[in-house]
Structure formats: structure tokens, C-alpha cells
Image (cartoon, rainbow, N blue to C red):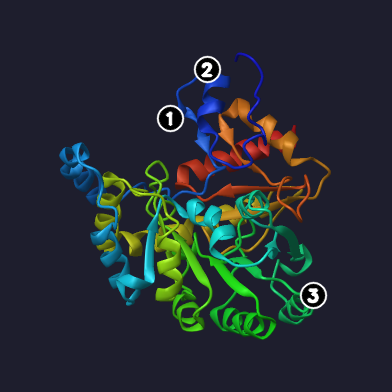
Amino acid sequence: MHGSYQIKQSFGHGGTVYAAARYLGVAPEEILDFSASINPLGPPPVVREAVMAAYDRIVHYPDPEATELREALARRHEITPSEVCPANGSTELIHLLPRLIPGSRALIVAPPFSEYAAALEKGGWEVHYFFLESGNGFSLSLSRLAERLADGFDLLILANPGNPTGALVPLAEVNNMLELCRISGTIPVIDEAFIDFCEEESAISAVIGDGRGLVSRSLTKFYALPGLRLGYAVAATEVIERLSGLIPPWSVGTLAQAAGVAALADTGYRDRTLGFIAREREFLSAGLAALHGLRPFPSAANYLLVELTSGLSATSLRERLLPYRILIRDCANFPGLSDSFFRVAVRGHEENRQLLSSLAEVIGA
């Protein structure tokens, strides 16, 4: 091993596999990355075929409207193409919010993905948090939220399921939340980057009907395509028209468009993923709960938030796991969480077993 492991929380996200590999002096493929929550089944096989078939088209500029992808997404959600906007990952959409939404005061349901605050603060917004409590499994209290919205906010951001908590707000409660936003004059933005891993219905229809808000989605988590950067927004036509005017030209590349169209057409992949994740999430959660000093929280997504109850910090645990070539996500930099929390992705069965075995050695030591 050479130098110091400088990535730690400097980037603020998981998925720092390349820096870890350089530090350990190994190939990235030798790292078990539990810090990034990507479908362990890998991309659908049809995606490789589609990308190779589209390869010769890279001599041309991409379709700036991403027409085929837009139409495929519209069919998927039974909406019109005018109600969907493809983007270079859902993070691009998050960073456009300060220019899309009128106002200057935002309320973010926490603990949240760090890019919401980063994007808003760069745009000069005032950021506030509505903290969910670990004691009740990070469930959303509508009565408390109503009181907070009465303070006057232009924007409310909710990730569903929550990242990093994995807690899912049922659609009926999301509808009630949208009504609270209408009453308070707050524009709702719902981040459904991980909802494809759930059986729960999306809030897309409700948000389109609301006419003011937006749902952001990701294709990279569920279809294991983070290197291609592919996300999209769904909203009423008027909102999508304004958003499309903010998207940079050729934001979604030719290969990403081809991959997205092919992935959406593979319905069997979705069924396989849902069954696999449900089984492995249960296995991993039970294994974590059996280890001394660990408290995993229920999750509807492809990751688990875990609380350390024995006094060991997540930072220390992360460093102790590094010689095992295992990465976990230290959650200390999530507002509302402390150094007692970490997150792990649900991976393949043998990889999950290896994580549990390594954790047992590290915690026992």
C-alpha cells in the first residue's frame, strides 16, 4: 500500500473504488464495493448488444431530444413524451433545480443525499432540513411536516425510498404530502432514484396531476449503468418544457440513449432483480443483526443503513475493512446522522457472505 487513503469523505459519496484500488495497489475489480448501491446482477445483457450496435454512431452528435429514449420512458410510465425529460444522470437534474424552481428557501427531508444541498447552495438558496428520527425507523410524520411547512418554504425535497435510510413512504402518504405542499404553496420534488427496487407505486401520476412538482428518476442504479450517466425527470408538460430549456445540448450521449432503450425493453431483468434483491437483502439484514453491536434498519431499497451500538465509529470500521478490500459507506457526512452509522449495498450472495465474515473478524478483534 502506498501513500495515504485520501478519498475518505472528500468526495462525499460512495463508489470511490478507483482511489481505494490505487491505495491498496490492486485492480479495481479486486475491490468489493459495498459503498455504491448498484444492481449486483450487472447490466442487462441486451445493453451490451445495444451499445455495440450503436458504436458506429459515435461519429455523429447524439440526438439532442433523445427521442427514442423519451418515447420508451413514456411507454414505461404510460405518460406522454412531453411529460418526460432525459438527462445526464439524475444528479444533473438536481443541479438544475435552483434555476427551474422559483424561490430561495428549501426544506430537505433528512438524512438526505448530499447533492441536494450542494446544488441549492451553489444557486444561492437557503437550505433547511426536516429531520427524520432513527427511533421510529425514519418514518415520515405528516403532522410534524405540516407544522414545518407553515414556516414558509418554496421547495420541498423528499427521496423515496430514502437515501441512505432505505425507508419507503407509501404512496398514500406521498399523496397526503403533496396536499400539504399545495396548501403551503411549496413545490414538491420527489427523488425516486431507487424506487425501481420496490414494488411500491411511483408518485409520477400524482405529481403530473399536481402540475407544479417534479419526480427525478435514475436508470443507472437499477440497470447497473453508473458509468454511462442516465436519468430523467417526469412532470407536467409545462414544467418539462422549462426544464428541457435548461438541459445543456447533447446532454445524453448516443451510447447512453441506446443503453436506456434496450434496458427498458428487458422486462424479465426487472423481475429477476426484484426477486434477487429481496432474498439477499433479507439474508444480509439478518446476518448484520446477528453481529454484536450492529443494528440494521428495515429497507425497501438495495442497501441497508446500519447503526453501530458498541462505541466503534463508522470511520474506524471503514478503515479496518480496507485491508479486506471491502468498501462501506461511512454516513457521518449525511445531515441528521452521526459517525455511528454506515450503509452497505446488497450485493451477490457470496460477496454478502464475505462482508459478514469480514465484519465478524473486525468487530471481534
Q: Is residue 245 left or right of residue 293?
A: left
Query: Which residue type does callout 1 highlight?
Result: Glu
Circle 2: is it few (<14), some (14-19), or many (20+) Cα within 10 Å?
Answer: few
Q: Quadrant of residue 253?
A: top left
N-terminal-most mark, 3 or 1: 1
Q: Is residue 360 above or below residue 290?
A: above
Residue sitting nearer the eye, 261 or 299:
261
Q: Is residue 69 left or right of residue 283?
A: left
The number of numbered discs placed on residues in the rendered structure image is: 3
Circle 1: is it few (<14), some (14-19), or many (20+) Cα within 10 Å?
Answer: few
Query: Which residue type does callout 2 highlight?
Result: Gly
For the residues carrying marks 3 and 1, which lies nearer the camera in this image? 3
Q: Secondary structure at mark 2?
A: loop
Query: Which residue type does callout 3 highlight?
Result: Asp
Q: Where residue 223 sits in the image (x, y, percent)? A: 37, 53
Q: Which residue in the structure is indicated by mark 1?
A: 29
Q: Where residue 109 sits in the image (x, y, percent)? A: 68, 65
Q: Secondary structure at mark 3?
A: loop
Q: Where residue 337 sits in the image (x, y, percent)? A: 76, 53
Mark 3 vs 2: CB contact within 8 A: no
Q: Is residue 80 above or below residue 233?
A: below
For the view shown, which residue lies furthest in the right direction? 311
Q: Quadrant of residue 29?
A: top left
N-terminal-most mark, 3 or 2: 2
Q: Where residue 306 sits in the image (x, y, percent)? A: 68, 52
Q: Secondary structure at mark 1?
A: helix
Q: Which residue in the structure is indicated by mark 2?
A: 25
x 43%, y 74%: residue: 238
Residue sitting nearer the eye, 5 or 99:
99
x 63%, y 53%: residue: 123
Q: Which residue in the structure is indicated by mark 3?
A: 151
